[in-house]
Protein backbone atom coordinates (compact mmCIF):
# COMPACT_ATOMS: atom_id res chain seq x y z
CA UNK A 1 0.00 0.00 0.00
CA UNK A 2 1.31 3.43 -0.88
CA UNK A 3 1.69 5.60 2.21
CA UNK A 4 3.10 8.64 0.45
CA UNK A 5 1.33 11.83 1.41
CA UNK A 6 3.62 14.61 0.24
CA UNK A 7 2.24 18.06 -0.55
CA UNK A 8 3.43 19.07 -4.01
CA UNK A 9 6.24 21.44 -3.20
CA UNK A 10 6.91 24.98 -2.19
CA UNK A 11 3.79 26.57 -3.66
CA UNK A 12 1.47 24.73 -1.28
CA UNK A 13 3.94 25.23 1.54
CA UNK A 14 3.98 28.99 1.02
CA UNK A 15 0.18 29.02 1.10
CA UNK A 16 0.11 26.99 4.29
CA UNK A 17 2.65 29.19 6.03
CA UNK A 18 0.95 32.41 5.00
CA UNK A 19 -2.24 31.04 6.52
CA UNK A 20 -0.43 30.76 9.83
CA UNK A 21 -0.93 27.00 10.23
CA UNK A 22 2.47 26.40 11.82
CA UNK A 23 4.81 28.68 13.68
CA UNK A 24 8.11 27.80 15.37
CA UNK A 25 7.47 26.30 18.75
CA UNK A 26 8.48 27.67 22.12
CA UNK A 27 11.34 26.04 24.03
CA UNK A 28 10.43 22.66 25.46
CA UNK A 29 10.70 21.76 29.09
CA UNK A 30 12.91 18.81 29.85
CA UNK A 31 12.05 15.26 30.77
CA UNK A 32 10.22 15.40 34.12
CA UNK A 33 11.75 12.08 35.14
CA UNK A 34 15.40 13.10 34.87
CA UNK A 35 17.68 16.09 35.28
CA UNK A 36 18.90 18.11 32.32
CA UNK A 37 22.51 19.01 31.86
CA UNK A 38 23.78 22.34 30.61
CA UNK A 39 23.67 22.73 26.85
CA UNK A 40 26.81 21.02 25.57
CA UNK A 41 29.32 21.72 22.83
CA UNK A 42 28.00 18.97 20.58
CA UNK A 43 29.03 15.43 19.77
CA UNK A 44 30.67 13.51 16.96
CA UNK A 45 30.09 9.80 17.45
CA UNK A 46 31.22 6.93 15.27
CA UNK A 47 28.84 4.11 14.35
CA UNK A 48 29.27 2.04 17.52
CA UNK A 49 29.78 4.92 19.98
CA UNK A 50 27.27 6.18 22.50
CA UNK A 51 25.40 4.78 25.49
CA UNK A 52 25.19 1.09 24.58
CA UNK A 53 22.43 -0.87 26.29
CA UNK A 54 20.82 -4.32 26.14
CA UNK A 55 17.10 -4.94 26.74
CA UNK A 56 16.00 -7.19 29.55
CA UNK A 57 13.84 -10.05 28.22
CA UNK A 58 10.14 -9.28 28.48
CA UNK A 59 7.56 -11.71 29.85
CA UNK A 60 5.75 -13.71 27.17
CA UNK A 61 7.50 -12.06 24.21
CA UNK A 62 8.70 -14.12 21.24
CA UNK A 63 9.87 -11.20 19.08
CA UNK A 64 11.73 -8.96 21.54
CA UNK A 65 14.81 -7.21 20.17
CA UNK A 66 17.96 -8.94 21.41
CA UNK A 67 20.77 -6.84 19.89
CA UNK A 68 22.19 -3.83 21.79
CA UNK A 69 20.76 -0.38 21.09
CA UNK A 70 22.66 2.90 21.39
CA UNK A 71 21.35 6.15 22.87
CA UNK A 72 23.38 8.85 21.12
CA UNK A 73 21.71 12.22 21.80
CA UNK A 74 19.39 13.17 24.67
CA UNK A 75 19.49 15.26 27.88
CA UNK A 76 22.22 12.96 29.27
CA UNK A 77 24.23 12.56 26.04
CA UNK A 78 25.11 15.96 24.61
CA UNK A 79 22.65 17.77 26.93
CA UNK A 80 20.00 18.14 24.23
CA UNK A 81 16.82 19.70 25.61
CA UNK A 82 14.66 18.80 22.61
CA UNK A 83 16.04 16.12 20.29
CA UNK A 84 16.48 12.48 21.28
CA UNK A 85 18.35 10.19 18.90
CA UNK A 86 19.41 6.57 18.98
CA UNK A 87 20.35 3.65 16.76
CA UNK A 88 19.53 -0.02 16.83
CA UNK A 89 19.59 -3.09 14.65
CA UNK A 90 16.61 -5.43 14.53
CA UNK A 91 17.53 -9.04 13.82
CA UNK A 92 15.75 -10.99 11.05
CA UNK A 93 12.24 -11.94 12.17
CA UNK A 94 12.27 -9.57 15.15
CA UNK A 95 10.01 -6.55 15.53
CA UNK A 96 9.23 -3.31 17.32
CA UNK A 97 5.74 -3.98 18.65
CA UNK A 98 2.80 -1.59 17.98
CA UNK A 99 2.80 1.49 20.20
CA UNK A 100 2.05 5.24 20.19
CA UNK A 101 4.07 8.24 21.36
CA UNK A 102 1.65 10.74 22.89
CA UNK A 103 3.76 13.91 23.16
CA UNK A 104 6.58 13.57 20.60
CA UNK A 105 6.85 13.23 16.84
CA UNK A 106 9.32 10.59 15.65
CA UNK A 107 11.38 10.03 12.51
CA UNK A 108 12.87 6.63 11.68
CA UNK A 109 15.62 6.53 9.04
CA UNK A 110 16.52 3.11 7.65
CA UNK A 111 20.29 2.78 7.43
CA UNK A 112 20.40 -0.79 6.17
CA UNK A 113 18.30 -3.90 5.68
CA UNK A 114 14.61 -4.24 4.82
CA UNK A 115 11.32 -4.69 6.59
CA UNK A 116 7.68 -3.64 6.85
CA UNK A 117 6.46 -0.52 8.67
CA UNK A 118 2.91 -0.36 10.04
CA UNK A 119 1.86 3.28 10.33
CA UNK A 120 -1.65 3.75 11.64
CA UNK A 121 -3.66 1.00 9.94
CA UNK A 122 -1.43 0.91 6.84
CA UNK A 123 1.58 -1.19 5.90
CA UNK A 124 4.49 -0.37 3.60
CA UNK A 125 7.84 -2.00 2.79
CA UNK A 126 10.98 -0.11 3.82
CA UNK A 127 14.63 -0.55 2.86
CA UNK A 128 17.95 1.31 3.11
CA UNK A 129 17.47 5.07 2.72
CA UNK A 130 13.77 5.05 3.61
CA UNK A 131 12.21 7.54 6.03
CA UNK A 132 9.19 6.98 8.28
CA UNK A 133 7.60 10.06 9.88
CA UNK A 134 5.33 9.23 12.83
CA UNK A 135 3.26 12.14 14.17
CA UNK A 136 2.48 12.01 17.87
CA UNK A 137 -0.35 9.66 18.86
CA UNK A 138 0.02 7.61 15.66
CA UNK A 139 0.36 3.83 15.88
CA UNK A 140 3.74 2.51 14.68
CA UNK A 141 5.27 -0.95 14.39
CA UNK A 142 8.29 -2.21 12.44
CA UNK A 143 9.29 -5.75 11.51
CA UNK A 144 12.48 -7.07 9.91
CA UNK A 145 11.38 -9.24 6.97
CA UNK A 146 14.82 -9.48 5.38
CA UNK A 147 17.79 -11.83 5.76
CA UNK A 148 20.10 -9.30 7.48
CA UNK A 149 19.82 -6.84 10.38
CA UNK A 150 17.45 -3.91 9.90
CA UNK A 151 19.47 -0.90 11.09
CA UNK A 152 17.52 2.23 12.03
CA UNK A 153 18.29 5.67 13.40
CA UNK A 154 15.36 7.09 15.41
CA UNK A 155 14.84 10.74 16.36
CA UNK A 156 12.21 12.20 18.71
CA UNK A 157 11.12 15.83 19.00
CA UNK A 158 10.95 15.72 22.81
CA UNK A 159 12.56 13.71 25.62
CA UNK A 160 10.71 10.93 27.39
CA UNK A 161 10.96 7.64 25.51
CA UNK A 162 14.69 7.28 26.14
CA UNK A 163 14.00 6.95 29.87
CA UNK A 164 11.55 4.12 29.25
CA UNK A 165 14.23 2.44 27.13
CA UNK A 166 16.70 2.80 30.00
CA UNK A 167 14.29 1.26 32.51
CA UNK A 168 13.73 -1.73 30.21
CA UNK A 169 17.47 -2.37 29.77
CA UNK A 170 20.92 -2.51 31.30
CA UNK A 171 24.27 -1.16 30.19
CA UNK A 172 26.01 -3.51 27.77
CA UNK A 173 28.16 -5.93 29.72
CA UNK A 174 25.88 -6.07 32.75
CA UNK A 175 23.58 -9.05 33.43
CA UNK A 176 20.25 -8.61 31.60
CA UNK A 177 17.89 -10.39 33.98
CA UNK A 178 14.36 -11.04 32.65
CA UNK A 179 11.64 -8.58 33.59
CA UNK A 180 8.85 -9.96 35.75
CA UNK A 181 5.32 -9.21 34.57
CA UNK A 182 4.85 -6.89 37.56
CA UNK A 183 8.06 -4.99 36.74
CA UNK A 184 7.04 -4.49 33.13
CA UNK A 185 3.58 -3.26 34.13
CA UNK A 186 5.08 -0.78 36.63
CA UNK A 187 7.56 0.57 34.09
CA UNK A 188 4.83 1.07 31.49
CA UNK A 189 2.61 2.80 34.05
CA UNK A 190 5.38 5.27 34.94
CA UNK A 191 5.82 6.22 31.28
CA UNK A 192 2.20 6.17 30.13
CA UNK A 193 2.22 9.96 29.96
CA UNK A 194 4.28 9.74 26.77
CA UNK A 195 4.13 6.15 25.38
CA UNK A 196 1.36 3.55 25.19
CA UNK A 197 2.04 0.01 23.99
CA UNK A 198 -0.75 -2.18 22.67
CA UNK A 199 -1.75 -4.73 25.25
CA UNK A 200 -0.49 -2.51 28.09
CA UNK A 201 -3.87 -2.38 29.81
CA UNK A 202 -4.86 1.02 28.39
CA UNK A 203 -7.42 1.83 25.76
CA UNK A 204 -5.67 1.44 22.40
CA UNK A 205 -7.12 4.64 20.95
CA UNK A 206 -7.36 5.43 17.24
CA UNK A 207 -4.42 4.26 15.12
CA UNK A 208 -3.93 7.68 13.49
CA UNK A 209 -4.03 8.42 9.78
CA UNK A 210 -1.13 10.84 9.28
CA UNK A 211 2.55 10.38 8.73
CA UNK A 212 4.78 9.42 5.82
CA UNK A 213 6.70 6.45 4.50
CA UNK A 214 9.18 7.61 1.85
CA UNK A 215 11.65 5.49 -0.08
CA UNK A 216 15.23 6.60 -0.63
CA UNK A 217 14.63 8.90 -3.62
CA UNK A 218 11.21 10.20 -2.60
CA UNK A 219 10.26 13.58 -1.19
CA UNK A 220 10.51 17.19 -2.31
CA UNK A 221 13.51 17.03 -4.63
CA UNK A 222 15.31 20.32 -5.29
CA UNK A 223 18.48 21.59 -6.98
CA UNK A 224 20.53 24.52 -5.67
CA UNK A 225 21.07 27.56 -7.84
CA UNK A 226 24.83 28.21 -8.32
CA UNK A 227 26.16 30.76 -5.84
CA UNK A 228 28.34 33.70 -6.82
CA UNK A 229 32.05 33.09 -6.36
CA UNK A 230 31.74 29.61 -4.89
CA UNK A 231 34.15 26.87 -5.93
CA UNK A 232 32.48 24.12 -3.90
CA UNK A 233 28.76 24.62 -4.63
CA UNK A 234 26.72 21.51 -3.91
CA UNK A 235 25.45 20.26 -7.27
CA UNK A 236 23.46 17.09 -6.52
CA UNK A 237 19.74 17.34 -5.69
CA UNK A 238 18.71 17.44 -2.05
CA UNK A 239 15.43 16.10 -0.69
CA UNK A 240 13.19 17.74 1.88
CA UNK A 241 11.34 14.83 3.45
CA UNK A 242 9.63 16.06 6.63
CA UNK A 243 8.57 19.61 7.51
CA UNK A 244 5.46 21.77 7.64
CA UNK A 245 4.85 21.16 3.93
CA UNK A 246 5.79 17.49 3.83
CA UNK A 247 3.87 15.51 6.44
CA UNK A 248 2.77 18.60 8.37
CA UNK A 249 5.31 18.47 11.20
CA UNK A 250 5.38 21.70 13.18
CA UNK A 251 8.50 20.63 15.09
CA UNK A 252 10.88 18.37 13.18
CA UNK A 253 12.51 19.18 9.84
CA UNK A 254 14.29 16.36 8.02
CA UNK A 255 16.07 16.06 4.70
CA UNK A 256 18.66 14.04 2.83
CA UNK A 257 21.49 14.89 0.45
CA UNK A 258 24.59 13.41 -1.15
CA UNK A 259 27.80 15.48 -1.22
CA UNK A 260 30.01 14.63 -4.17
CA UNK A 261 33.74 13.94 -3.56
CA UNK A 262 35.53 17.19 -2.69
CA UNK A 263 32.31 19.13 -2.03
CA UNK A 264 31.50 20.74 1.29
CA UNK A 265 28.83 22.34 3.43
CA UNK A 266 30.44 25.66 4.33
CA UNK A 267 30.83 26.83 7.96
CA UNK A 268 27.63 28.20 9.47
CA UNK A 269 25.60 28.36 12.69
CA UNK A 270 21.92 27.69 13.38
CA UNK A 271 20.79 30.15 16.02
CA UNK A 272 17.39 28.72 16.99
CA UNK A 273 17.48 25.00 16.21
CA UNK A 274 19.57 22.02 17.27
CA UNK A 275 20.62 19.72 14.43
CA UNK A 276 21.54 16.05 14.10
CA UNK A 277 23.41 14.72 11.06
CA UNK A 278 23.40 10.96 10.49
CA UNK A 279 25.92 9.65 7.95
CA UNK A 280 24.24 7.08 5.73
CA UNK A 281 27.17 6.37 3.41
CA UNK A 282 30.62 7.62 2.47
CA UNK A 283 33.24 9.40 4.54
CA UNK A 284 34.35 12.93 5.30
CA UNK A 285 35.45 15.39 7.96
CA UNK A 286 33.09 17.29 10.28
CA UNK A 287 34.25 20.54 11.87
CA UNK A 288 32.20 21.20 15.01
CA UNK A 289 33.29 24.40 16.69
CA UNK A 290 37.08 24.26 16.35
CA UNK A 291 37.31 20.44 16.38
CA UNK A 292 37.82 18.36 13.25
CA UNK A 293 36.72 14.72 13.32
CA UNK A 294 36.51 12.08 10.60
CA UNK A 295 33.03 10.67 10.00
CA UNK A 296 31.85 7.64 8.05
CA UNK A 297 28.75 5.50 7.50
CA UNK A 298 26.77 5.15 10.74
CA UNK A 299 28.34 8.25 12.31
CA UNK A 300 26.33 10.91 14.14
CA UNK A 301 27.00 14.62 14.57
CA UNK A 302 24.96 16.56 17.14
CA UNK A 303 25.12 20.35 16.67
CA UNK A 304 23.57 22.44 19.46
CA UNK A 305 22.12 25.76 18.38
CA UNK A 306 24.75 28.47 18.05
CA UNK A 307 27.54 25.96 17.31
CA UNK A 308 29.67 26.33 14.18
CA UNK A 309 29.45 23.36 11.80
CA UNK A 310 30.91 22.43 8.43
CA UNK A 311 31.23 19.13 6.60
CA UNK A 312 33.48 18.05 3.72
CA UNK A 313 33.48 14.90 1.63
CA UNK A 314 37.05 13.56 1.70
CA UNK A 315 36.17 10.14 0.28
CA UNK A 316 36.05 8.62 -3.18
CA UNK A 317 32.24 8.26 -3.32
CA UNK A 318 29.19 10.30 -2.33
CA UNK A 319 28.83 11.35 1.31
CA UNK A 320 25.15 10.72 2.04
CA UNK A 321 23.66 12.44 5.08
CA UNK A 322 20.25 12.62 6.71
CA UNK A 323 19.80 15.89 8.64
CA UNK A 324 17.17 16.69 11.28
CA UNK A 325 16.39 20.05 12.91
CA UNK A 326 14.50 20.57 16.17
CA UNK A 327 12.36 23.37 14.76
CA UNK A 328 11.47 24.98 11.41
CA UNK A 329 13.39 27.71 9.59
CA UNK A 330 16.38 26.42 7.65
CA UNK A 331 14.26 24.50 5.15
CA UNK A 332 12.85 27.81 3.86
CA UNK A 333 16.35 29.17 3.26
CA UNK A 334 17.09 25.96 1.34
CA UNK A 335 13.99 26.49 -0.79
CA UNK A 336 14.91 30.10 -1.59
CA UNK A 337 18.39 28.98 -2.73
CA UNK A 338 17.02 26.29 -5.04
CA UNK A 339 14.40 25.20 -7.58
CA UNK A 340 12.36 21.99 -7.90
CA UNK A 341 14.33 19.31 -9.71
CA UNK A 342 13.71 19.51 -13.46
CA UNK A 343 13.31 23.30 -13.56
CA UNK A 344 16.07 25.64 -14.82
CA UNK A 345 18.48 26.61 -12.01
CA UNK A 346 19.85 30.04 -13.02
CA UNK A 347 22.83 31.31 -10.99
CA UNK A 348 22.09 33.57 -8.06
CA UNK A 349 23.31 37.12 -8.49
CA UNK A 350 25.34 38.59 -5.63
CA UNK A 351 22.36 40.81 -4.78
CA UNK A 352 19.92 37.88 -4.67
CA UNK A 353 22.33 35.81 -2.61
CA UNK A 354 22.83 38.61 -0.06
CA UNK A 355 19.09 39.31 0.18
CA UNK A 356 18.25 35.65 0.85
CA UNK A 357 20.81 35.39 3.62
CA UNK A 358 19.60 38.65 5.16
CA UNK A 359 16.00 37.38 5.24
CA UNK A 360 17.07 34.26 7.15
CA UNK A 361 19.71 35.77 9.42
CA UNK A 362 17.43 35.40 12.42
CA UNK A 363 18.03 31.63 12.38
CA UNK A 364 21.14 30.90 10.24
CA UNK A 365 24.47 32.75 9.92
CA UNK A 366 27.29 31.77 7.55
CA UNK A 367 30.98 32.52 7.97
CA UNK A 368 32.27 35.14 5.49
CA UNK A 369 33.46 33.50 2.27
Image (cartoon, helix red, strand yellow):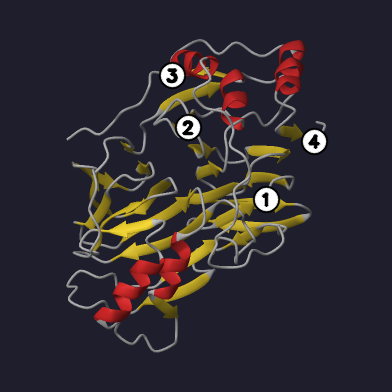
Lower position in the chain sequence, tag 3 or tag 4: 3
Q: With respect to residue 224, does 186 lie above or below?
A: below
User: Residue 181, located in which quarter of the rendered image?
Assistant: bottom left
Lower position in the chain sequence, tag 4 or tag 2: 2
Q: Which of the two discs, 2 and 3, sits closer to the camera?
A: 2
User: Residue 40, located in which quarter of the rendered image?
Assistant: bottom right
Residue 10 in the image: x percent, y percent?
A: 48, 17
Callouts 1 and 2 close, C-beta under 8 Å? no
Q: Which of the two discs, 1 and 4, sits closer to the camera?
A: 1
Q: Which residue is mark 2?
A: 243
**Callout 2: few (<14), some (14-19), or many (20+) C-alpha neighbours within 10 Å?**
many
Disc 1 and disc 2: Cα gap in Å?
19 Å
Lower position in the chain sequence, tag 2 or tag 3: 3
Q: Residue at x 49, y 65 (%)?
A: 71
Callouts 2 and 3 close, C-beta under 8 Å? no
Lower position in the chain sequence, tag 1 or tag 3: 3
Residue 93 in the figure: left or right of residue 113: left
Q: Which residue is mark 3?
A: 9
Residue 324 in the figure: left or right of residue 367: left
Amino acid sequence: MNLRHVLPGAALCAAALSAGCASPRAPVAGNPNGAEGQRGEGLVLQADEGERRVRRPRPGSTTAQTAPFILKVDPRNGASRELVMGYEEIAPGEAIQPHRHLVADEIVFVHRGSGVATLGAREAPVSAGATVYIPRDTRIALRNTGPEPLGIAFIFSKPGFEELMRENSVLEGQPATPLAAEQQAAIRARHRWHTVAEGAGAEPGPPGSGGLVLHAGEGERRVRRPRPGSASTLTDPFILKVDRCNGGSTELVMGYEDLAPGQAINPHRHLLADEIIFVHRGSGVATLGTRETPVSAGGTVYIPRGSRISLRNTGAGPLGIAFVFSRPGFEELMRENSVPEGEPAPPLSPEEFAAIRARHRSHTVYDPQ
